[in-house]
Image (tube, grey):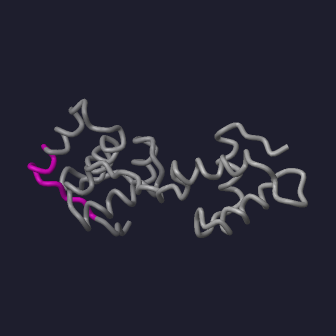
Amino acid sequence: MNRKYKIDLTDESRSKIQEKLSSNAAPQSVKKRANILLLSDMSIGNPMRQSEIAARCGVSDVTVFNTLRDYCTYGLEYTLTYKRMKTTNPPIVTGDIEARIVALACGKAPEGFSRWTVRLLTEKIVELNIIDEISRETVRTTLKKHNLSLI
């Protein structure tokens, strides 16, 4: 069977992998990637198939493929480092804006209306230049966070 990524670990690489496996500080995902590399090493003998490695390590076939690809493309250090999730976008509504939205919702409803609606609040917030643009859902979650009901 033709393999796209062939793993030939040196003695030095194998010892680094063993260090990661024996370390208590290493995350479980890093240990799984280390096991994947050891099981797919061609220098020891005929390695297992990727599906067998996946079953043995408790990961998906894609994880095995990505680990082997990362090792061949970027090297051992990259493969055995913990990859953090990318940070999310910062919140649109900060404390000051949130306070102004709550104050507006607690105030008197506009003329011609008996109460505030989320849609009315959203329009008024943009009209008063509290924030340039905001969705109704953001206004609703901000009010819900403060246990405010518009009923």
Of 16 and 144, nearer the camera is 144
Residue 16 position (above or below residue 128): above
Nearer the observer, 27 or 140 = 140
Question: Which one is nearer the viewer's eye here, 18 or 39?
Answer: 18
Q: Quadrant of the C terminus?
A: top right
Measured as percent of width and height from the top left, residue 4 is found at 34, 69
Left or right for 51, reference 74: right
* 84 horizontally vs 25: left or right: right
Res. 73 image quadrant: bottom left
Q: Residue at x 25, y 30 (%)?
A: 24
From the top left corner, tell me how far across and down residue 11 is, in percent: 10, 49
Query: What residue is rendered at 69% in x and 51% in y?
Result: 104
Q: Quadrant of the N terminus?
A: bottom left
User: Start and end of the magenta stretch?
Assistant: 6-15
Residue lying at the far left in this picture: please name it. 12
Which residue is painted at 25% across and 65% down in the image?
72
Q: Is residue 26 magenta?
A: no
Q: Residue at x 66, y 47 (%)?
A: 103
- Position of 127 relative to 8 (above/below): below
Residue 12 painted magenta: yes
Name the side, left or right, on which 4 lies relative to 43.
right
Q: Which percent across, then down, holds residue 100?
A: 61, 52
Where is residue 76, by image quadrant? bottom left
